[in-house]
């Protein structure tokens, strides 16, 4: 039986305003399928975003939602979690929102390890504000602020998350909805700070400026730039060079911040 997505959507906000070919809607549906499997009560779920194309997501979702300031989604989300640790907190952020103005919050949210899930809708560009190069824009790719091609090395969201202390790290492409569903579900179930680097093609700005074609052609390019982490051991260093691994990349267990804070309060109270 097909899933009834509308039970989780604010129907009065439909249709959405994402561009034709954008992968954001696909990722949003993966989030809803994961929540449907978990059967969490809607009043127990909080979805927080900052500013950007991806940050429109909470406006469409019928949960407790916050649309906050640019780069500060994780700050608001951590405040929510501290106020009520029983809430299931999900943060939606773009690559610019999370890794540029929000970069410092990203690092320390990973370090603190609150039980929050961050899903980065990563389209390698500032899609809402005019197509500027972002921290994940590939070297040599064009943006309105890099008309001759970006000369900087892009951030690897997953490497940054793992190095900063996140306890669950994964990457998935919107072309593979099954894999996207799987890693988002696992991220939501992880006890600690989880990061999913969700790749989503921006046909309007990145695709046009870089002559990458339509949505299907961009998806094919992303497939060529990645490899399944499960096949890594069978691949030579040359085959993996310059490519991004896709799948569940890292998971570990360490103390969750809210639980440790609760212990501190109990200890000090005595």
Image (cartoon, rainbow, N blue to C red):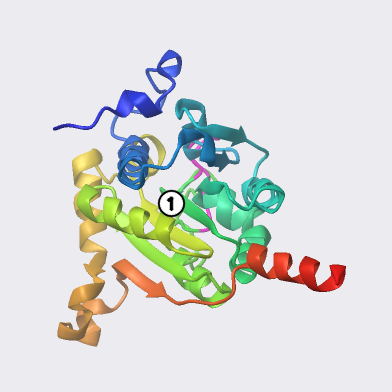
- Residue bounds of the magenta highlight: 126-135
Asked whether 257 or 158 is in front, the reply is 257
Magenta stretch prevailing secondary structure:
loop
Instruction: Please name the residue shown 23% across and 48% down the image.
Output: 177
User: Residue at 15% across / 84% down in the picture?
Assistant: 234
Residue 36: in sight, yes or no?
Answer: yes
Residue 138 in view: no
Residue at image position (50%, 52%) is 95
Q: Number of numbered discs present?
A: 1
Quarter of image, res 232: bottom left
Q: Which residue, given by chain and number where applicable, does mark 1 sit on?
A: 124
State the quadrant of the N terminus.
Answer: top left
Between 230 and 243, the one nearer to me in the picture: 230
Mark 1 Cα-neighbour bin, 10 Å: few <14, some 14–19, many ≥20:
many
Q: Quadrant of residue 223?
A: bottom left
Residue 128 painted magenta = yes
Viewer-proximal residue among 236 and 213: 236
- Quadrant of image for the C terminus: bottom right
Image coordinates for residue 150, horizontal then vertical, percent: 48, 58
Q: Measured from the top left, where is residue 118 in percent x and y?
A: 50, 54
Viewed as shown, does residue 113 lie left or right of 79? left
**Picture coordinates of residue 89, whole percent (x, y):** 55, 48
Residue 29 lies, in percent from the top left, at 32, 38
User: Dot 1: what SS?
Assistant: loop
Which residue sits furthest right? 269
């Amino acid at each position: 039986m097909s899933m009834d997505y509308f039970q989780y959507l604010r129907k009065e906000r439909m249709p959405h305003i994402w561009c034709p070919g954008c992968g954001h809607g696909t990722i949003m549906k993966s989030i809803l399928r994961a929540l449907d499997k978990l059967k969490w009560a809607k009043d127990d779920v909080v979805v927080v975003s900052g500013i950007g194309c991806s940050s429109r997501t909470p406006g469409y979702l019928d949960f407790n939602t916050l649309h906050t300031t640019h780069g500060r989604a994780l700050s608001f989300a951590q405040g929510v979690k501290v106020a009520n640790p029983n809430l299931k907190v999900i943060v939606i952020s773009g690559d610019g929102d999370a890794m540029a103005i929000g970069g410092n919050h990203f690092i320390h949210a990973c370090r603190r390890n609150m039980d929050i899930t961050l899903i980065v809708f990563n389209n390698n560009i500032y899609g809402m504000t005019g197509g500027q190069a972002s921290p994940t824009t590939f070297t040599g790719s064009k943006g309105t602020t890099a008309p001759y091609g970006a000369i900087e090395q892009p951030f690897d969201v997953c490497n940054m998350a793992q190095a900063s202390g996140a306890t669950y790290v994964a990457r998935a492409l919107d072309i593979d909805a099954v894999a996207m569903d799987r890693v988002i579900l696992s991220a939501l179930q992880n006890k600690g700070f989880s990061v999913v680097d969700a790749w989503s093609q921006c046909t309007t700005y990145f695709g046009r400026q870089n002559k990458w074609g339509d949505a299907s052609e961009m998806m094919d390019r992303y497939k060529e730039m990645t490899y399944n982490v499960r096949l890594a051991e069978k691949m030579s260093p040359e085959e993996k060079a310059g490519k991004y691994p896709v799948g569940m990349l890292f998971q570990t267990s360490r103390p969750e911040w809210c639980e440790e804070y609760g212990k501190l309060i109990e200890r000090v109270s005595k």
